[in-house]
């Protein structure tokens, strides 16, 4: 954690920020290791302060390292005012993406320092995972893989999508997950044409394609995997669409490495699907970064011309969606390496027909 704070201080100096106010829960955990629900951090070039209330003092002292723990007595802003005065802070950076307008109005009125919007500093550090983070994400992916195997064993015609989702979610918790990465998507039959078709009361029928998009949270980090399979024969068109998505997804894996831009990776899948005649049916980006949150940098999209770096963990998830017929999406989590990548999700990808 101390190393992460030092990296943040380097970014603060580049932006000429005297101190940085951290309020995002994910950024707080990344920077301080604090897992409670009430606290903020103020980082200066010389000191690191964590401010919380009586309920979390013991937890903060146990979890944080190299930080001065301050207890506020119901007036959190008052503690920030004191630090601004005693530490001679002239420019206070803050996470404008997380501070409400009402909170900002209060700060602007009572804090005697320039308030500098500075979201993204910690997020940029979070994009490159260290070995400890990678090991945790690998475990989250392993739990998801076991979850998919569990679904293949228990799913059957007559079950509702929500029944499948609930059983999957509970199973992953039984393996040590603290929760799901997002609301589990189970989209069957024509509903599989909905890219974010969260589980419904629809009954799964013979001949349905089923898209299962899910993940779990393990020790604060997420996994994200999608598999599409069939309950009985889904028909020739859906089989052909599956093969196109399968090949597009593999082509991304073949070229993903440090130095390739997000836009270049997106084009690999998009161009292949377009050449196959389904370009208009692939309407979302090819992927995104994951870590402490389900969507973080870098984006694998047409708009991202930044090069991928060693330690990025990204999703690779092209799809084709035909309204009234169905859809196919296949998704893996990839760790970016100097040469190539490592696939963290190991569930089978060839079309499975149950």
Image (cartoon, grey):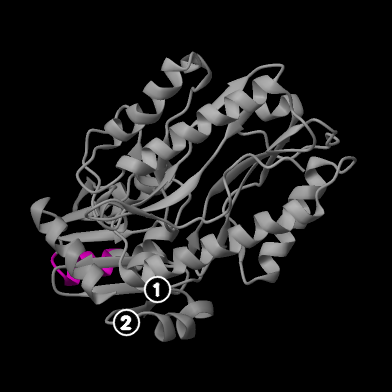
Q: Residue 340, image x and y in percent? A: 29, 50
Q: Residue furthest right?
A: 158
Dot label at residue 33: 1
Quarter residue 335 falls in: bottom left
The reply to whether the C-beta atoms of the residues labelled 1 and 2 are less than 8 Å apart is yes
Residue name at image x 26 percent, y 69 percent: 82
In this rendered view, identify the residue nearer to me: 231 or 135: 231
Q: Residue 136, image x and y in percent? A: 45, 69
The answer to whether residue 50 is left or right of residue 4 is right
In this rendered view, identify the residue nearer to me: 169 or 55: 169
Residue name at image x 43 percent, y 68 percent: 39
Give the vertical position of 56 relative to 117 (above or below). below
In this rendered view, identify the residue nearer to me: 251 or 65: 251
Q: Residue 92, image x and y in percent? A: 21, 55
Image quarter (top left, top right, bottom left or bottom right) of the N terminus: bottom left
Give the vertical position of 115 relative to 247 (above or below). below
Give the vertical position of 56 relative to 135 (above or below). below
Q: Earlier in the sequence, mark 1 or mark 2?
A: 1
């Amino acid at each position: 954690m101390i190393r992460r704070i030092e990296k943040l201080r380097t970014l603060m100096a580049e932006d000429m920020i005297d101190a940085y106010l951290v309020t995002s829960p994910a950024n707080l955990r990344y920077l301080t290791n604090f897992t409670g629900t009430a606290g903020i951090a103020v980082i200066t070039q010389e000191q690191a302060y964590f401010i919380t209330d009586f309920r979390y003092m013991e937890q903060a002292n146990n979890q944080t390292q190299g930080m001065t723990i301050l207890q506020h007595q119901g007036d959190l802003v008052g503690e920030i005012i004191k630090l601004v005065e005693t530490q001679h802070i002239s420019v206070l950076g803050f996470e404008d993406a997380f501070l409400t307008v009402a909170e900002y109005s209060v700060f602007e009125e009572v804090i005697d320092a320039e308030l500098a919007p500075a979201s993204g500093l910690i997020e940029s550090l979070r994009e490159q995972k260290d070995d400890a983070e990678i090991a945790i994400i690998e475990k989250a992916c392993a739990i998801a893989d076991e979850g998919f195997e569990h679904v293949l064993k228990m799913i059957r015609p007559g079950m509702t999508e929500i029944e499948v989702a609930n059983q999957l979610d509970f199973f992953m918790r039984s393996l040590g997950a603290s929760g799901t990465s997002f609301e589990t998507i189970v989209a069957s039959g024509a509903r599989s044409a909905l890219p974010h078709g969260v589980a419904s009361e629809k009954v799964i029928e013979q001949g349905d394609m089923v898209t299962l998009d899910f993940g779990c949270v393990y020790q604060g980090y997420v996994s994200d995997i999608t598999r599409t399979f069939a309950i009985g024969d889904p028909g020739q068109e859906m089989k052909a669409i599956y093969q196109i998505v399968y090949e597009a997804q593999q082509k991304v894996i073949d070229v993903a490495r440090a130095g390739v831009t997000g836009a270049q990776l997106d084009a690999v899948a998009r161009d292949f699907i377009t050449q196959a005649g389904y370009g208009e049916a692939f309407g979302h980006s090819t992927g995104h970064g994951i870590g402490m949150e389900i969507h973080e940098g870098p984006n694998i999209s047409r708009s991202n011309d930044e090069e991928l770096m060693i330690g990025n963990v990204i999703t690779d998830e092209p799809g084709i969606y035909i309204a009234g017929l169905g859809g196919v999406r296949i998704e893996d989590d990839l760790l970016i390496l100097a040469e190539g990548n490592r696939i963290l999700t190991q569930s089978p990808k060839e079309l499975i027909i149950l």
